[in-house]
């Protein structure tokens, strides 16, 4: 039976995260979302690692369960030990900033990783610790600890802190990791890109592409995720990823990448939003302030791509694009996402129709129509069919998705008045 996994989240010990980012709350949200396997995040932080050891128990096969689950035993959420680290270093005459995810099968292995990294930097300072050594040395350090550790470059296209980032990245896996490049079999595409964009690089054909939420608050988990059809087993999952097994790793769940906050180019403070072509026509200079524009993910992909837009490799693992249910409800009701009206309707629908992701992906439209309002039902239909209006994100500003046209919204507001 298939299941959904979101590997990349953070704890409250990471900067700019919710105080609710701890395993009990995450488990409750995972049930709402329909996520069976969730990364712990931040196992490198000493205080959080102690919490994980106190609150989790081995569930067999390299995964973990809550010792005192808030949910019924037939719907327990499994956890997998994950962390993200930040390497800032100089290589090839340029300052590099790379984020990398680490997966571990046991507390003992995680503890050995922490002991090795504690010699190189301060693990107490942040849930995502920073080191000044080259990221290729990170690969060497952890692979010497255990061959079962999975190493995954994170959100590889964001302008800062990523493998291919326009501002501090590299042009290839080999350039970045040099003699350790063969150990990189999986990369995370990030919110501002999707598999279709990555398929344009033939150099990534043998690399498995995963997608995760990188959540800093519980409600954001599952906004991107991965769908598997294999045992809930650390070793089977890691093997499926390393070998790009299309029978075990079925597809990814994606943001519409335009909604990511670095999809297009521009300047947030100047209100300048450019396509790659517009950026080139302005010689990469902001027409308002005269400074260099922030080059986004789409531009960077096009600069490295050796295939046209729309190309699909023969063995590609598919993707399905979604808009979070709360956002669909909010637009359908002309309410804010965090309002009581939206929260109430969200809880009512998942109570009767199952989890959020099951509802968005699998529940037949006729079943949704029996319980949801016509506007919510129509919103879900349009998202499934990708009939959306999208203003791309840029320079740290999330993109804006509109499911309904402005005229439709005005009609709804007028009906509510009368």
Image: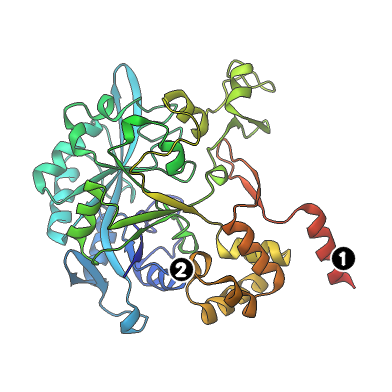
* Residue depicted at 32% across the width and 79% down the height: 69
Query: Against 236, is 393 above or below?
Result: above
Is residue 257 shown to the viewer in this render? yes
Q: Quadrant of the C terminus?
A: bottom right
Q: Nearer the viewer, residue 266 or 23?
A: 266
**Residue placed under numbered mark 2 in the picture:** 33
Q: Which mark is residue 277?
A: none
Colour convention of the picture: rainbow
* Residue depicted at 32% across the width and 27% down the height: 172
Q: Residues within 10 Å of mark 1 (few under 14, many from 20)?
A: few
Marker count (numbered): 2
Q: Residues within 10 Å of mark 2 (few under 14, many from 20)?
A: many
Name the spot of residue 108 as percent of width and height, x first.
12, 59
Q: Secondary structure at mark 1?
A: helix
**Residue placed under numbered mark 1 in the picture:** 414
* Residue depicted at 42% across the width and 69% down the height: 34
Q: Is residue 13 left or right of residue 282?
A: left
Name the spot of residue 378 as percent of width and height, x first.
67, 65
Name the spot of residue 25 as percent of width and height, x first.
41, 70
Q: Secondary structure at mark 2?
A: helix
Residue 99 picture quarter = top left
Query: Against 256, is 87 above or below?
Result: above
Residue 185 picture quarter = top left
Q: Nearer the viewer, residue 218 or 193?
A: 193
Residue 226 picture quarter = bottom left
Is residue 337 shown to the viewer in this render? no
């Amino acid at each position: 039976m298939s299941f959904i996994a979101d590997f990349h989240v953070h704890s409250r010990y990471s900067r700019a995260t919710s105080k609710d980012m701890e395993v009990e709350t995450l488990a409750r949200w995972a049930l709402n979302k329909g996520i069976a396997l969730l990364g712990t995040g931040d196992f490198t932080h000493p205080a959080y690692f102690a919490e994980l050891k106190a609150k989790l128990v081995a569930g067999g096969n390299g995964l973990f369960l809550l010792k005192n689950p808030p949910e019924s035993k037939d719907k327990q959420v499994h956890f997998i030990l994950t962390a993200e680290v930040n390497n800032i270093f100089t290589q090839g005459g340029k300052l590099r900033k790379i984020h990398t995810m680490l997966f571990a099968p046991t507390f003992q292995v995680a503890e050995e990783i922490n002991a090795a990294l504690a010699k190189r930097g301060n693990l107490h300072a942040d849930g995502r610790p920073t080191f000044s050594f080259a990221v290729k040395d990170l690969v060497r350090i952890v692979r010497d600890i255990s061959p079962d550790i999975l190493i995954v470059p994170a959100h590889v296209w964001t302008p800062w802190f990523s493998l291919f980032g326009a501002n501090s990245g590299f042009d290839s896996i080999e350039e970045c990791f040099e003699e350790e490049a063969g150990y990189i079999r999986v990369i995370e595409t990030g919110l501002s890109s999707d598999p279709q964009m990555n398929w344009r690089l033939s150099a990534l054909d043998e690399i498995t592409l995963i997608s995760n939420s990188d959540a800093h608050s519980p409600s954001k988990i599952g906004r991107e995720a991965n769908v598997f059809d294999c045992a809930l087993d650390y070793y089977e999952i890691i093997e499926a990823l390393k070998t790009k097994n299309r029978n075990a790793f079925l597809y990814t769940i994606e943001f519409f990448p335009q909604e990511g906050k670095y999809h297009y180019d521009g300047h947030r403070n100047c209100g300048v939003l450019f396509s790659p072509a517009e950026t080139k026509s302005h010689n990469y200079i902001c027409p308002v302030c005269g400074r260099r524009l922030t080059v986004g993910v789409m531009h960077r992909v096009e600069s490295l791509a050796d295939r046209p837009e729309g190309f699909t490799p023969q063995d590609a693992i598919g993707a399905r694009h979604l808009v979070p249910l709360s956002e669909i409800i909010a637009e359908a009701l002309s309410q804010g996402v965090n309002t009581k009206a939206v929260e109430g309707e969200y809880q009512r629908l998942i109570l009767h129709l199952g989890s959020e992701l099951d509802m968005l992906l699998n529940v037949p439209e006729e079943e949704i129509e029996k319980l949801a309002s016509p506007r919510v039902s129509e919103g879900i239909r349009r998202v499934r069919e990708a009939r959306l209006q999208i203003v791309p994100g840029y320079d740290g500003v999330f993109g804006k998705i509109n499911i309904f046209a402005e005229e439709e919204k005005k009609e709804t507001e007028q009906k509510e008045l009368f």
